[in-house]
Image (cartoon, rainbow, N blue to C red):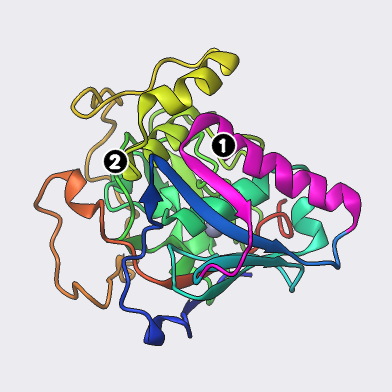
Amino acid sequence: LFLLLQSPFRVFSSASPKWPKRRGTVQIPYIISYKYDKPSVKIIKEAFADFARFTCIKFVPYSYQRDFISIMPMSGCFSSVGRTGGMQVVSLAPACLRRGKGVTLHELMHVLGFWHEHSRADRDKYIRISWNEILTGFEINFMKSWNSNMLVDYDYSSVMHYGRYAFSMTGLPTIIPLSNPFVALGQRRNLSSSDIARVNKLYKCSPTLTESGREELGLEPCPTEGEIKVSTPSPTAGASSPGTKPPETVQSARRPSRQMTSAPTAWTEEITGRTAMDGEGLNVP
Ligand SMILES: [Zn+2]
């Protein structure tokens, strides 16, 4: 399921939660648990390969670096958000790998510093949360986060978006898209083109490094600074669920009273070391 925990490693780290870039490449050292069988390791490596192909993020085998991820099959699928410092666990239980690389991509996006798409501070323009349908005690999964990265337009097809029935009590939708009621939510197959764009933007990847990979998929060239257009239809602004007035915001400990008044790019660096525990791949209806 899904919980928010302060990372125990955070205490010992005053470093930036972004991973460092050297000579144009961001290397993230990894250890993969010996408990995985070959097909599972293959799936995890497929996810690594996607980041290498489309971004400047390269997952490299651990060789005594200070900060690294340790991928292991604990219970559930979860990861810290951003670099915590030292070893950080990415849990991928067998169920998280059963349907291919999608859940791994999702957890690795957390590792890079991305929060859930439906938690973005601007999400009310794109989705409505049906608070009354959410399983009691799981409302926190639907609160807005000031830490969410808003480098690109809201993307229903992001690998970081939950499905419309996430944590539903009765089987009715908990997330209702506002622009098109039939739009697909919660895909766990590939990084969407905006997922790729946001990684390249957060880490300022050089387009030349990632261009060949993009051509393979027939994607458009990476948007550069200033080229990101705000072109999303703006459906019923201000539409929110009537009646209940749940707490709307998970505020970061570092910026307790931030209001949403500045440009989206202001959130770029605001990643905190929380641990995201997902029900990914386990409770998909
Ligand atoms: Zn997640």
Magenta-tinted stretch = 37-65
The reply, left or right, for residue 152 in relation to residue 41 is: left
Of residues 71 and 170, the one drawn nearer to the viewer in this rendering:
71
Disc 2 marks which amino acid?
A: Leu
Look at the image and say whether residue 192 sits in the magenta stretch: no
Q: Position of residue 155 (x, y in %)?
A: 42, 35
Secondary structure under badge 1?
Answer: helix
- Kindly identify the residue that appears in the image at 58 percent across and 17 percent down: 217
- Kindly identify the residue that appears in the image at 66 percent across and 50 percent down: 103
Give the quarter of the figure containing the N terminus: bottom right
Report which residue position mark 2 lands on.
151
Disc 1 marks which amino acid?
A: Ala
In this view, 135 is above or below 10 = above
Report which residue position mark 1 lands on.
52
Q: Position of residue 89 (x, y in %)?
A: 61, 71
Q: Position of residue 46 (x, y in %)?
A: 71, 40
Of residues 255 and 62, the one drawn nearer to the viewer in this rendering:
62
Secondary structure under badge 2?
Answer: loop
Check whether the beta carbons of the residues at disc 2 and disc 1 lie within 8 A of each other: no
Determine the image quadrant of residue 42: top right
Between marks 2 and 1 in the image, the one whose residue lies nearer the viewer:
1
Q: Which mark is residue 71?
A: none
In this view, 112 is above or below 81 = above
